[in-house]
Image (cartoon, rainbow, N blue to C red):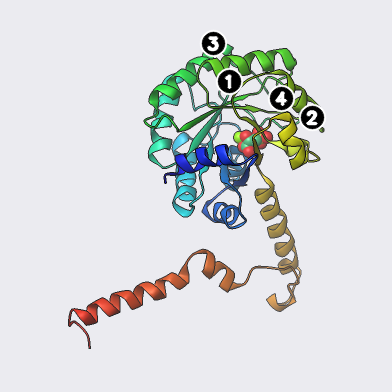
């Protein structure tokens, strides 16, 4: 089954689809190993691992390169955060072709003006594209995909940009009408009230997606009653890795020897397992077995 089909099947069979954020192949693999339904290849986390602002600095090709490494490492679907689509409708069209070819299951595009800034940045510049221009991007994305199950998630930043609930609802309805496959409603409030209000009011039929970074108190059992279908844990792996590396580096820099390191770090075996080092042995044995059969070695 293709990753596109797996994602569609999960949406049909599960009440909530849980998506873990990743920033490279290793973190994506860990997301998979911990039983999440899909991977979020987020622009914030990927930009951070390049020590760059989440502000449309990295190119589409650079994001795609990282995202492809996640697809190659994982069996679960990868959902790519494609920011504003890297330009206008023509850029979106090119992007969809590239991401679909790479084996990505879904892309998310947001209705901000390029270059965008991260939605949760205090006093960040949050400028909305017109509804019409964003609808044009959705039309371009739909037209560019080969598999009609490849998902196009339309993300509205109306609440982030301070345009209010009515604007958010109107845009979500327009994006549904334009043919989006899911709506992502983003909020930077520190409680889920406005997301619940949106979910209870908009009246759409598409799966609703949330990213509750700023309102972490939201519980899984609250999602179903508000018809929220997909929850994205966008950046916790990145922040955990950042915190753990800082702690261990601090300890090493203050120690005479590595044996003083108290910080719990993964064993070499853990990493060998993740990078499939042990499978090399099996491959060597298989090759040897065949070489023997063919009379090259005794
Ligand atoms: C990301 O993870 O890159 C997102 C979510 O787009 S947010 O950082 O909240 O904008
Ligand atoms: Mg992003």
Residue receiving disc 2: 189
Residue 150, image quadrant: top left
For residue 113, which numbered disc appears in the image? 1
Give me the C-alpha separation between circle 2 and circle 1.
Answer: 21 Å
Q: Quadrant of ligand 1?
A: top right
For residue 232, which numbered disc appears in the image? none
The mark that comes first in sequence, 4 or 2, is: 2
Label 1, residues with CA under 10 Å away: few <14, some 14-19, many ≥20: many
Residue receiving disc 4: 199
The reply to whether the C-beta atoms of the residues labelled 4 and 2 are less than 8 Å apart is no
Give me the C-alpha separation between circle 1 and circle 3.
Answer: 13 Å
**Left or right: 117, with 162 as reference point:** left
Q: In the figure, 112 relative to 58: above or below?
A: above
Which residue is at a point 76% across and 27% down the rendered structure image? 196
Viewer-nearest of discs 4 and 3? 4
Instruction: Classify mark 3: helix, strand or loop.
Output: helix
For residue 132, which numbered disc appears in the image? 3
The mark that comes first in sequence, 1 or 3, is: 1
Disc tally is: 4
Give me the C-alpha separation between circle 4 and circle 2.
Answer: 15 Å
Residue 270 place in picture, x, y as percent? 58, 69
The reply to whether the C-beta atoms of the residues labelled 1 and 4 are less than 8 Å apart is no
The mark that comes first in sequence, 4 or 3, is: 3
Instruction: Classify mark 2: helix, strand or loop.
Output: loop
Residue 101 place in picture, x, y as percent? 38, 38
């Amino acid at each position: 089954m293709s990753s596109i089909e797996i994602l569609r099947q999960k949406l049909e069979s599960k009440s909530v689809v849980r998506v873990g954020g990743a920033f490279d192949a290793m973190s994506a693999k860990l997301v998979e190993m911990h039983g999440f339904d899909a991977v979020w290849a987020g622009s914030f986390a990927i930009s951070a691992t390049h020590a760059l602002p989440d502000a449309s600095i990295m190119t589409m090709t650079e994001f795609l390169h990282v995202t492809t490494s996640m697809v190659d490492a994982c069996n679960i679907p990868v959902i790519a955060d494609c920011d504003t689509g890297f330009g206008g409708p023509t850029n979106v069209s090119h992007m969809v072709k590239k991401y679909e070819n790479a084996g990505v299951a879904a892309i998310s595009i947001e209705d901000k003006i390029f270059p965008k800034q991260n939605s949760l940045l205090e006093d960040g510049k949050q400028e909305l594209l017109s509804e019409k221009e964003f609808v044009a991007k959705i039309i371009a994305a739909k037209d560019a995909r080969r598999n009609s199950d490849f998902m196009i998630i339309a993300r509205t930043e109306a609440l982030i940009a301070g345009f209010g609930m009515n604007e958010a609802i109107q845009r979500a309805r327009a994006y549904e009408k334009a043919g989006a496959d899911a709506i992502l409603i983003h909020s930077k409030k520190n409680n889920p009230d406005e997301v619940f209000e949106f979910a209870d009011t908009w009246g759409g039929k598409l799966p609703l997606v949330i990213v509750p970074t700023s309102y972490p108190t939201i519980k899984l059992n609250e999602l179903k009653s508000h018809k929220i279908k997909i929850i994205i844990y966008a950046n916790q792996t990145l922040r955990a890795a950042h915190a753990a590396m800082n702690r261990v580096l601090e300890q090493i820099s203050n120690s005479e020897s590595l044996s003083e390191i108290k910080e719990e770090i993964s064993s070499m075996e853990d990493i060998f397992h993740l990078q499939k080092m042990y499978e090399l042995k099996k491959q060597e044995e298989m090759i040897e077995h065949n070489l023997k059969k063919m009379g090259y070695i005794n």
